[in-house]
Image (cartoon, rainbow, N blue to C red):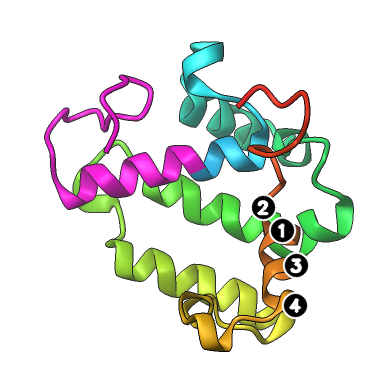
């Protein structure tokens, strides 16, 4: 997916499981507000250490409000950590990742992420759902992305 080492899976092979790893890194970046390219940190290792020390709430980007973090954040963090497993065979398929993200969304707002792919079914409510799930980092003035 990306040529940068921060996004590449440990096995350094192009594969679906490698793409899942890269997606997990991107999801961790969105949830934490940290970037692997600019910070140079091993983001999965940092997040795991925070979870292990029971500082999970400190992992999240401060721009993610408590209600959004409680509703979506912890579930999305769990999905991201499964995606960045060190062993490819322990990572889910992308289909399973999408299914799990849809479960998180539908459990909280009864909206299917897959319905967002169809322009004729898209509504402003769907857009707001996605923005509440993932912080606006790319288009925020002063963002480091």
User: Residue most toward the front?
Assistant: 120
Say whether residue 12 is magenta: yes
Q: How far apart are marks 4 and 2 (CA)?
A: 15 Å
Closer to the eye: label 3 or 2: 3
Q: In this view, does 119 lie to the left or right of 125?
A: left
Badge 3, how many Cα within 10 Å: few under 14, some, many 20+?
few
Q: Which of 9 and 50 is in front in this view?
A: 9
Specify few, some or many for label 2: CA neighbours under 10 Å numbering under 14, 14-19, or 20 or more.
some
Q: Which mark is residue 125?
A: 4
Which label was assigned to residue 134?
2
Q: Earlier in the sequence, mark 4 or mark 2?
A: 4
Which residue has dot 1 on it?
131
Where residue 128 is drawn, which disc sits there? 3
The span shown in magenta is 1-26
Residue 143 in percent (x, y) is at 71, 26
Sequence order check, earlier mark of 4 and 1: 4
């Amino acid at each position: 997916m990306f040529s940068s080492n921060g996004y590449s899976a440990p096995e350094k092979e192009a594969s679906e499981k490698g793409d899942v790893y890269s997606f997990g890194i991107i999801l961790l970046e969105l949830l934490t507000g940290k970037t692997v390219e600019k910070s140079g940190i091993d983001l999965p290792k940092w997040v795991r250490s925070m979870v292990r020390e029971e500082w999970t709430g400190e992992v999240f980007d401060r721009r993610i409000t408590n209600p959004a973090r409680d509703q979506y954040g912890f579930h999305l963090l769990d999905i991201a950590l499964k995606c960045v497993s060190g062993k490819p065979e322990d990572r889910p398929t992308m289909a399973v990742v999408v299914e799990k993200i849809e479960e998180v969304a539908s459990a909280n707002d009864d909206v299917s992420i897959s319905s967002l792919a169809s322009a004729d079914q898209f509504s402003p409510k769907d857009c707001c759902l996605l923005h509440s799930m993932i912080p606006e980092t790319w288009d925020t003035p002063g963002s480091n992305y």
